[in-house]
Amino acid sequence: MLMPMTATTATRISIIDRIRRHTTWLVAALLPLLGAGALSSALSSCGGGVAALALGGVGTGGTGLTIGTVVALGSVGVDDHEYDSQAPQYYEDGNATATPATVVGLGQRIHVETDAANNPLTMTVEPTLVGTIQGTPTIHADGVTGSFVVNGVTVVTNIDPAAGPVTFYVGLTDITSLADGTRVQVHGLFHGNAGGTGNTIQATRIALSPATDTATRITGVVTGLAPNATGESFQIAGSGMTVQMTSATPTEPAGAALANGQVVNVLSATAPSGTMIAADNVRIHGLAGTTTTAAVEGLASGSGGVFTVDGVAVDATAPGLPAVHDGDAIVVTGQEDANGTLHASAIRAYATQPAQVRLKGTITGYVSDSRFLVRGVPVDAGGVVVTTVAGGTPAALGNGVYVEITGNPGGSGQGDVVVAASVASSSVPPVGAVVDYLGTIGGFVGDASPFTLRGTFGGVTDPTVTLTDNVQTVNGTEGSLADGKAVEVEGTVTANGLTVYSLTFLGSAPTPSDTNGVVHGYVAGGSAFTVNGIVLTLTGATMFYDGTATSTPPPWFTDGAPVEVNYTQSGGQNLAQSINFDGD
């Protein structure tokens, strides 16, 4: 992305919070000596705990790891487990700088590092492929599934819940929206072998990416590894692409040796030069050199008692485990050994997933019961009987109403909207619920003190906002906080107000109508564009905001750009009042 995002660690109001902010190095030093359980107990007795500590990335300090696909938001749901979204630090795309929790989206591949009590420490989002589509996509006879190629790697879409997470689209309607040259970010399940025959990515998420973005990402099996004058080079099996490293190119995990046959994820800041990708980072799938409890979701490559899932070698020879066949969508749980092999203690078919999608949060961008957002995900609940959340207050659907939803992308198949199967609502969210509110700051004294969010939210007028010690900001820093500033906050409900861990500065006070998502259908110099299926119009008064306000469309405003749009309706048009950069 072209625009900077400033993420800062906040100064908080309690002495304990201040102490906790400086304990990351101590945890990293003591964890191997005391054990995670003992250290967690010691910190908890001080009123803290380790759930909010960021130890710098996957596999660096936790005792457990989950690798899977995001299927729930509210709490972050990975496969059949939901994690507290307030506790961890978030990372994206190989970036060592923490990002806001809003970086997490439906269908993304994610690594969750946990402590001994299974509390999340870090969540790292990692795309599988980033680049432009090569050639015309193949659309199957059903009209909704098919395949296409990015960076020489074949991507297949999925409509069958038993075969893994159903493909979810962002900024695109379905596979028919794709064309030769469309720039996309793909998250998905790797399936393949060292020979490259049949190597594919089964997409869990396909997002429109800005054409101005030059980053490249490729995932596949290393073959032909050899030194050369620059450093080392290798091919991604079956792709026709060569990866060139230098002596300075980092590999992850740190110190791990690159070898033929490994599954790797390669990131480059630049577009390929022909068939050559200049690597800026190479991450080896698997956990060689560590010992941890792990759960890995993906497609089995191989069969019998020894196979791989997401590049992790699995030993499934323990008695009582089910038979596994090549291509099966499974979740494997077990213990990792020092050589990086996961010794399976349990294997379940992905087909036993409780629901394809689970959403919990407050409604934003409400247009009708058939078009609204929850945690930024478009939802169609038209025709669904709305029940009441347990212990909640009955409420019709609308902005600010708390809901709990299950559903599927496209209803029975893939798409860019979650079609709800069940909806429960409440005008007052329960304590502990994740909420998303737009308002203006009031009662601001300093960044060490709480402030209020002006307005009525969840039945509470001007709720008190307390920022967490791991709060992240977009379009500004904590130094930007001031009375009257328009903000969007994400946080949890407490008995005393809101505990906020993500804050985005907006260019103007919220309007009754808003939406956030990815820009589609914009032509430079034009006035029309679409976000979440809503046709919007630029006017001479439209303001663009990314920390700095301008009335001229900035370079980042292009198809694929993540935005928050406040708009008004006039003469049958949706007139954009402010367009706020909403990415990283």
Image (cartoon, helix red, strand yellow):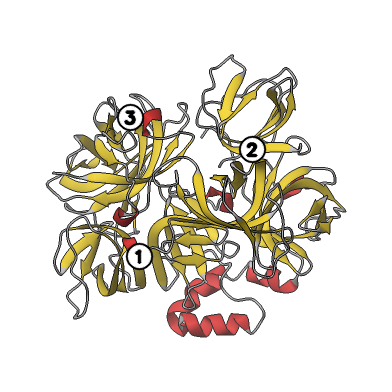
| Kind of element beneath mark 3 | loop
Spatial distance from mark 1 to mark 3, Cα to Cα?
33 Å
* Label 3 CA crowd tier, 10 Å (few <14, some 14–19, many 20+): many
The residue located at (43%, 65%) in the rendering is 80
Give the residue at mark 2: 515
Q: Quadrant of the C terminus?
A: top right
Camera sees residue 247? no
The residue located at (22%, 61%) in the rendering is 308
For residue 133, the mark is 3
In the rendered structure, are the residues bearing label 1 and label 2 in contact, judged by CB atoms less than 8 Å apart?
no
Work out whether residue 116 or residue 516 is closer to the camera in this orientation and state it.
516
Spatial distance from mark 1 to mark 2, Cα to Cα?
34 Å
On screen, 20 above or below 172? below
Q: How many marks?
A: 3
Q: Amino acid at mark 3?
A: Ile
Q: Position of residue 406 (x, y in %)?
A: 51, 57
Left or right of 70 on screen, residue 374:
right
Give the residue at mark 1: 352
| Kind of element beneath mark 2 | strand
On screen, 118 above or below 250? below
For residue 240, the mark is none
| Kind of element beneath mark 1 | helix
Q: Position of residue 130 (x, y in %)?
A: 37, 38
Q: Amino acid at mark 2?
A: Thr
Q: Position of residue 331 (x, y in %)?
A: 32, 65
Badge nearest the viewer, 1 or 2: 1
Q: Amino acid at mark 1?
A: Thr
On screen, 549 above or below 379? above
Spatial distance from mark 3 to mark 2, Cα to Cα?
28 Å
Work out whether residue 339 or residue 498 is closer to the camera in this orientation and state it.
498
On screen, 542 above or below 45? above
